[in-house]
Amino acid sequence: MINLKKSISLIALSITIASGRLCAQAPADNQELQKKAAEWVNELKLSDEVKKQKVQTAIAQHLTEVRDWHNAHPVKDNPGGINPGTGNTLNNLDWEVIYCSQKPKTVHENLMNTLKAALTPQQVEAVLDQYTIGKVAFTLKGYEAIVPDLTEKERAEILKNLKQAREQAIDYKSMKEISAIFEIYKTKCEQYLNSNGRNWKQLFKDYVNKRNAEKAAQNKK
């Protein structure tokens, strides 16, 4: 009986300590998100303080809700299954994306409505670029390098897809998840190029061979 009481006490103590750690971490995490939101808004150099605070609050709230949903739906054990579109086995990252995609639409809508009401379209894009560390411009440069004679029509379609990826990706917490969203739209870009007379695999192969040849030449110097 004594041992049982002692075990119960130890369990209770462990729970109390763990709860204390979580409570201590939460304010720190929240402060980090508040700091991130403030830094992003400061980059916009807004002169209207009311508008500035409104945007900052909306970003901080969105970051918090994305984090909380992500943390409340951890993928500890892979549930298994296959992707019905490809037949590939679903991995942990697939399930992270699936779970995070199930968050209420209002999480996204509340942020975007505030941004669009308070900022110019260019400023809204600047905020979304902060979320996704400039992946739109970086990825577009990659396509321009791989397809040197990219037409304006092709470029516009690729840019449209990448911007859709960016807006969707802001609702995911980790860079792995954000990159996974971009991969969906990169596939669409490559399918588009293939359907318009391009051979994406050959273009990519030619680009890799060119880069390898350039590196080899550089190493000989």
Image (spheres, rainbow, N blue to C red):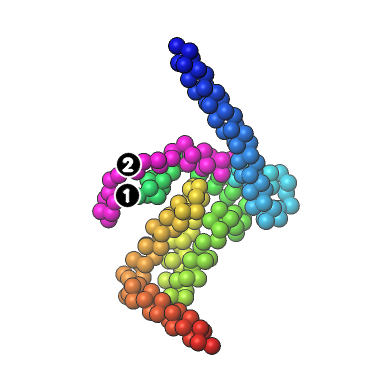
**Residue 210: image x %, image y %?**
43, 81
Question: Which residue does the image show at 67% across and 51% down from the upper left?
Answer: 39
Mark 1 = which residue? 90
Q: Nearer the viewer, residue 88 or 41?
A: 88
**Residue 40: image x %, image y %?**
64, 52
Residue 19 can be seen in this image? no
Mark 2 = which residue? 79
- Distance of mark 1 from mark 2, alpha carbons? 8 Å
Q: Residue furthest bottom?
A: 221
Quadrant of image for the C terminus: bottom right
Q: Is residue 62 magenta?
A: yes
Res 34 → quadrant: top right
Question: Which residue does the image show at 59% across and 49% down from the upper left?
Answer: 115
Q: For residue 2, which numbered disc appears in the image?
A: none
Q: Earlier in the sequence, mark 1 or mark 2?
A: 2
Q: Amino acid at mark 1?
A: Leu
Give, as a single range, the part of the protein colored magenta. Answer: 61-89
Question: Which residue does the image show at 46% across and 68% down from the upper left?
Answer: 156
Asked if the residue at tag 2 contacts the one at tag 1, i.e. Cβ–Cβ closer than 8 Å, the answer is: yes
Res 147 → quadrant: bottom left
Q: Nearer the viewer, residue 20 or 167?
A: 20
Q: Amino acid at mark 2?
A: Pro
Q: Residues within 10 Å of mark 1 (few under 14, many from 20)?
A: some
In this rendering, position of residue 59 left or right of residue 159: right
Quadrant of image for the N terminus: top left
In the image, residue 40 sits, relative to residue 3, either above or below, namely below
**Residue 88: image x %, image y %?**
28, 54
**Residue 32: image x %, image y %?**
63, 44
